[in-house]
Amino acid sequence: FGSSDWLLCAISRPPPGPQSPPPVSMSKKIETEKDLRLAMATGASSMLLVTGVQALARDNRTHCMGQATGSASVLAAVMLMNRVPYAGVAGAVVALMPFLNEGQSKTCQVMAGISAALCVGLAATKDRK
């Protein structure tokens, strides 16, 4: 290498710009947000699944509301697991259905309230870019 070769190598290097990777703190923040949303979706879907299976397993063949609630809960849980768009909104609506049915136990209503809150949180934190 001569002195001019060194100068050419120093000049030909592209300056850092928009192509440079994001700072480490920003990528960790994004990862943390994704992990939090995944945990919220997993919790909400498992609660909706349990609520749906309980509603379908009851010997309540004459009452269609239990079957409709159970089927809708299972559908919303599967939507959340498969990351379907607007699954959080659908889950929140379905999670509130046990409050309409007065025959539900308090435990079912608590679990429905928690899953509704998680679904609303998922819908509210969605990055819609």
Image (cartoon, grey):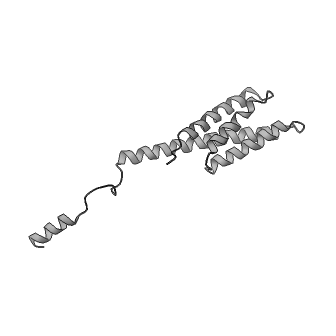
Q: Residue furthest left?
A: 3
Q: In this view, does 11 lie to the left or right of 22?
A: left
Furthest toward the front, the residue is: 129
Which residue is located at x 9 percent, y 69 percent?
Answer: 3
Instruction: Point out residue 90 in the picture as x, y percentages from the top left corner.
Output: 67, 42
Identify the residue at the far bottom of this view. Answer: 1
In-image side of 106 versus 123 (left or right): right
As rendered, which of 94 and 111 lies closer to the eye?
94
Q: In the picture provided, is 106 more to the left or to the right than 10?
A: right
* Residue 54 position in % (x across, y down): 77, 38
Residue drawn 40% across and 48% down? 27
Indicate whether 105 appears above or below 74. above
Quadrant where the image shows the N terminus: bottom left
Tell me residue 114's x, y (percent).
63, 32
Residue 121: percent from left, percent from top? 57, 36
Given residues 48 and 122, the one toward you in this image is: 122
| Horizontal side, residue 102 vs residue 47: left or right | right
Q: How many labels does the image show?
A: 0
